């Protein structure tokens, strides 16, 4: 259960203890008493024997003598500080180790310079210390600096580099970032294997743990068994390193329910640690936890509980990573719940949630990496909702709201709260310029590669494009992780909303808020109106299951996902978004309405008693427009929710909706309302076809190039843009129009600042790799720079200044669509406009019809312009609702394909 980072310390300790003695031997005669040399040798032997307390006492005496005889900043003092810190580390005294390491680092930097190998050794240990405490945000830049120094000083193929790569890979693995961890660990494996080095056991152990996390158990067992074999050969059967390899393998056997093998390995590891390190050492906690898991699986609670109690006591007392402690508390909560001890279970689960929050602030990387790491804890929040549901009338709705919101769209919340902050503040000018130069080089390289890509050279150029994109993201992650400003911002997040606060400030009168949670075990809906909150469990009953051709049971994320999309492309969402088949989805949408909307809530959606419906979807539900749900089906005539229901507003979380609603409007009050509209971009070699069939194969600009470099022209976007100009200018608003050759990225950046309304009618391209960062709005190509290449990417949208923007209309395909991430939601282009400053966004869930979209947006903006002319606040949600209904009333556009794609994201 525990990380394997501690393996590193023994190897370093033995090497550096020897080095420490060499340093002392070189000291001038008479500077150091002979007893220091003798005691140092004794400490080395005690360390090898695992007698750490005795060794620590000797190093403490040596440190005192050297400070008095040589001064506090002598290099031999630094070596002794380092050795003593390693002993403290092995004792689990992390709070004592860190200040010693910081002192040793300063002395070595002063003596050797910032880029010396001795500096890298101390950095390695500081990184390990941060990692075992779960402070990955601090550990990552330390490791990266140490790797860079070591490659320069010792060479990229050195054993020291392999050690650091292993540490970095282990840190990514600990955060659930397996795709990043695997190649790094394999690189370390290859280096150690070439050198036939005993530390290969360490990398094998980490690779085994990685594959176990991926449920690749055969591979996991192979590497973990090899780790045990190497450690026994090199160190003997009773070494504490052997105990680690055995504990990791034993933990795997618990997972595989091979309990006899597991118990033997785990108890042997525990005996070694307790004999050599004492009964309350952090390393014992992992074996105790695995034993508890094994006993629980067998229903032996009387054996499981003492083990997990002791493990938690050790983890808490030693300051182990908050994420590890969160998982341990959740485990103990589940044991209590299974034994009907509800109060104990809920108390432990609340502690687990709090610890998960603490860990979240210490994840490293950019927004997507941090969201991926936090997704490992979503089950903790789901469990709280599940248990409150099981309590029935005794369930606490404040706990339900807190659990759901704390697990939703947290990286987006970070970005919204810190939008516009310069993360480079505090960096040296040279470092800032270095990052900027590298970023420009990588982006220009990507632009050149994408322009070269054709069907003929796809096999050779496309891998280079993927590598270039990866390099850009790695640089951006490094810029964030190494930024003190960014780290401080992440630790300054606000707490979850209170229920009454949400009812008063967001729900208001005559509105209904639906917050969905779709987990691995069940599906839930928290319905909040002005006076009460109710929790519903969502199920697919036998009748609906038979009709929808699925299994009956709880509405889990997986079950709903298979209903909406599938490998045969016959899912409800796929049918709904198909121009030729959209009408055929009506009967399925009627069944889905019954599943998603409990009986108690249906009347309010039909009788016009509700003013607004606010929806916070989850998982695959994020791509379904609720307006297309069928509330009644008589024969072949469906009544959709849009026909009888209120306007619908969407948000990734209730907290996101609340924060957008309360965004400062100082800029908005001071600026005169103005409009920017972009339409009819001039695409290179544009096809004159207005059909969407060619576009369905396009996701990114790379695919656009493979298709022959031709995006279909969008003639109705010019008509749409002209209508918008006419509407707003008649209302007295300053309106700037960019079309044709003027509709470039550069033109948009020059014209966008301070606009109340932003309208972009163009192609939207989605990239399901790399979190859609390279998804883009396709506009007119400008000059040859990456900043004006005709593709306004999601990464570039984040950087726009949309302060003062009340509404961004993305009249393009799939602008509310993109890759989904558990807990975080959809990485869509619309997300970028919210982060950049827009209060609300209108965006599309699928490929849209050019003419229908143009007509809808014309009517929509006509309603808004009328409100501006009458000097009243526009009703954004009602205006879009009415415009969509107008489109539906047109005979040729009655199918939901034409009117259901566009949704309102954000507050009313």
Image: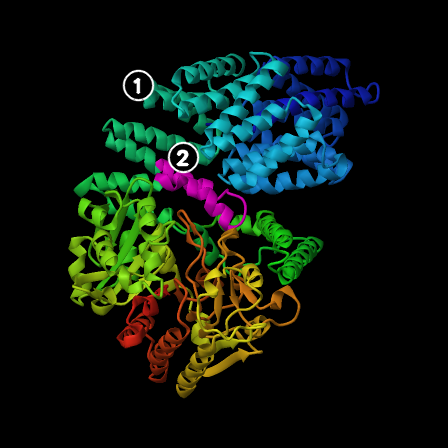
As drawn, 40 above or below 676: above
Q: Nearer the viewer, residue 520 or 423?
A: 520
Q: Nearer the viewer, residue 866 or 661?
A: 866
Placement of the C terminus among the 4 image quadrants = bottom left
According to the picture, the residue beneath numbered tag 2 turns out to be: 326
x and y, in percent, of residue 605 in the image: 20, 62
- Does residue 320 appear in this view? no
x and y, in percent, of residue 476 in the image: 59, 52
Which segment is the magenta one? 351-380
- Does residue 437 appear in this view? yes
x and y, in percent, of residue 303 in the image: 33, 17
The rendered magenta stretch, by its main secondary structure, is classed as helix
Tell me the CA gap for discs 1 and 2: 23 Å
Image point 37% across, 36% down: which residue?
Answer: 352
Q: Nearer the viewer, residue 511 or 690?
A: 690
Report helix, strand or loop for mark 2: helix
As drawn, 611 above or below 727: above
x and y, in percent, of residue 684 in the image: 59, 72
- Magenta span contains residue 359: yes
According to the picture, the residue beneath numbered tag 1 turns out to be: 300
- Magenta span contains residue 393: no
Image point 45% across, 83% down: which residue?
Answer: 722
């Amino acid at each position: 259960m525990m990380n394997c980072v501690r393996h590193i310390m023994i190897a370093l300790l033995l090497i550096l203890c020897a080095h420490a003695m060499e340093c002392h031997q070189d000291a001038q005669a008479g500077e150091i008493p002979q007893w220091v040399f003798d005691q140092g040798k004794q400490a080395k032997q005690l360390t090898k024997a695992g007698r750490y307390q005795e060794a620590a006492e000797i190093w403490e005496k040596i440190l005192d003598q050297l400070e008095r005889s040589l001064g506090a900043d002598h290099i031999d003092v630094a070596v002794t500080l380092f050795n003593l810190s390693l002993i403290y580390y092995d004792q689990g005294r992390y709070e004592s180790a860190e200040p010693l390491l910081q002192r040793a680092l300063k002395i070595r930097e002063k003596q050797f310079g910032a880029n010396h190998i001795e500096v890298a050794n101390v950095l390695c240990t500081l990184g390990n210390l941060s990692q075992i405490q779960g402070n990955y945000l601090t550990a990552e830049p330390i490791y990266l600096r140490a790797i860079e120094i070591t490659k320069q000083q010792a060479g990229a193929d050195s054993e020291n580099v392999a050690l650091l790569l292993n540490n970095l890979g282990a840190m990514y693995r600990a955060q659930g970032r397996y795709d990043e961890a695997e190649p790094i660990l394999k690189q370390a494996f290859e280096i150690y294997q070439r050198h036939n080095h005993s530390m290969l056991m360490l990398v094998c152990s980490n690779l085994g743990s990685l594959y176990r996390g991926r449920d690749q158990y055969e591979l996991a067992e192979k590497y973990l068994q090899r780790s045990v074999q190497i450690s026994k050969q090199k160190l003997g059967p009773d070494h504490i390193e052997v105990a680690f390899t055995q504990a990791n393998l034993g933990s795997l056997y618990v997972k595989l329910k091979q309990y006899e093998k597991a118990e033997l390995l785990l108890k042997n590891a525990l005996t070694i640690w307790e004999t050599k390190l004492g009964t309350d050492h952090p390393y014992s906690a992992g074996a105790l936890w695995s034993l508890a898991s094994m006993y629980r699986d067998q229903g032996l609670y009387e054996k499981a509980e003492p083990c997990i109690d002791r493990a938690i006591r050790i983890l808490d007392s030693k300051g182990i990573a908050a994420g590890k402690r969160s998982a341990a508390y959740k485990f103990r909560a589940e044991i209590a719940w299974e034994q009907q001890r509800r109060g104990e279970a809920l108390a432990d689960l609340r502690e687990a949630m709090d610890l998960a929050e603490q860990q979240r602030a210490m994840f490293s990387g950019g927004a997507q990496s941090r969201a991926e790491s936090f997704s490992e804890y979503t089950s903790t929040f789901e469990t709280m909702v599940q248990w409150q549901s099981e309590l029935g009338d005794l369930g606490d709705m404040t706990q339900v709201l807190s659990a759901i919101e704390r697990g939703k769209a947290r990286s987006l919340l970070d970005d919204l709260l810190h939008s516009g902050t310069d993360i480079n503040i505090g960096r040296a000018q040279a470092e800032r310029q270095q990052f900027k130069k590298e970023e420009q080089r990588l982006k220009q390289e990507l632009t050149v590669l994408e322009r070269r890509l054709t069907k003929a050279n796809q096999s050779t150029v496309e891998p280079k494009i993927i590598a270039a994109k990866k390099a850009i993201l790695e640089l951006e992650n490094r810029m964030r992780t190494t930024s003190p400003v960014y780290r401080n911002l992440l630790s300054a997040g606000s707490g979850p909303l209170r229920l009454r606060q949400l009812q008063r400030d967001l729900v208001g009168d005559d509105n209904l808020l639906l917050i969905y949670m779709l987990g691995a075990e069940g599906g839930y809906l928290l319905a909040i109106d002005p006076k009460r909150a109710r929790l519903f469990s969502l199920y697919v009953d036998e009748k609906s299951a038979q009709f929808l051709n699925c299994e009956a049971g709880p509405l889990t994320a997986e079950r709903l996902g298979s209903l909406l999309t599938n490998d045969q492309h016959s899912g409800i969402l796929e049918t709904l978004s198909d121009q030729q088949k959209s009408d055929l989805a009506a009967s399925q949408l009627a069944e889905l309405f019954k599943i998603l909307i409990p009986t108690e809530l249906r009347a309010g959606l039909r009788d016009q008693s509700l003013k607004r419906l606010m929806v916070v979807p989850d998982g695959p539900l994020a791509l379904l427009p609720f307006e297309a749900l069928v509330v009644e089906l008589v024969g072949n005539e469906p009544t959709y929710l849009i026909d009888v229901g209120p306007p619908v507003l969407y948000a990734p979380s209730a907290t996101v909706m609340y924060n957008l609603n309360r965004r400062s409007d100082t800029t908005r009050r001071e600026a005169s309302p103005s409009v920017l509209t972009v339409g009819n971009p001039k695409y290179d070699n544009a096809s004159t076809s207005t059909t969407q069939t060619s576009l369905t194969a396009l996701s990114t600009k790379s695919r656009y190039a493979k298709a022959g470099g031709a995006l279909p022209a969008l003639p109705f976007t010019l008509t749409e843009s002209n209508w918008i100009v006419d509407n707003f200018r008649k209302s007295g608003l300053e309106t700037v129009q960019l079309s044709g050759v003027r509709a470039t990225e550069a033109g948009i950046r020059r014209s966008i600042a301070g606009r109340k309304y932003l309208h972009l009618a163009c192609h939207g391209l989605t990239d399901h790799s790399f979190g859609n960062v390279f998804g883009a709005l396709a506009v007119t190509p400008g000059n040859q720079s990456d900043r004006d290449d005709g593709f306004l990417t999601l990464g570039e949208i984040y950087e726009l200044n949309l302060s003062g923007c009340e509404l961004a209309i993305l009249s393009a395909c799939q602008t509310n669509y993109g890759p989904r991430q558990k807990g975080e939601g959809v990485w869509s282009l619309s997300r970028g406009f919210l982060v950049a400053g827009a209060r609300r966004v209108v965006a599309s869930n699928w490929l849209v019809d050019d003419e229908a979209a143009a007509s809808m947006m014309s009517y929509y903006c006509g309603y808004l312009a009328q409100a501006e002319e009458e000097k009243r606040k526009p009703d954004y949600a009602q205006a879009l609702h009415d415009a969509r209904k107008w489109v539906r009333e047109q005979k040729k556009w009655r199918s939901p394909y034409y009117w259901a794609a566009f949704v309102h994201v954000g507050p009313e």
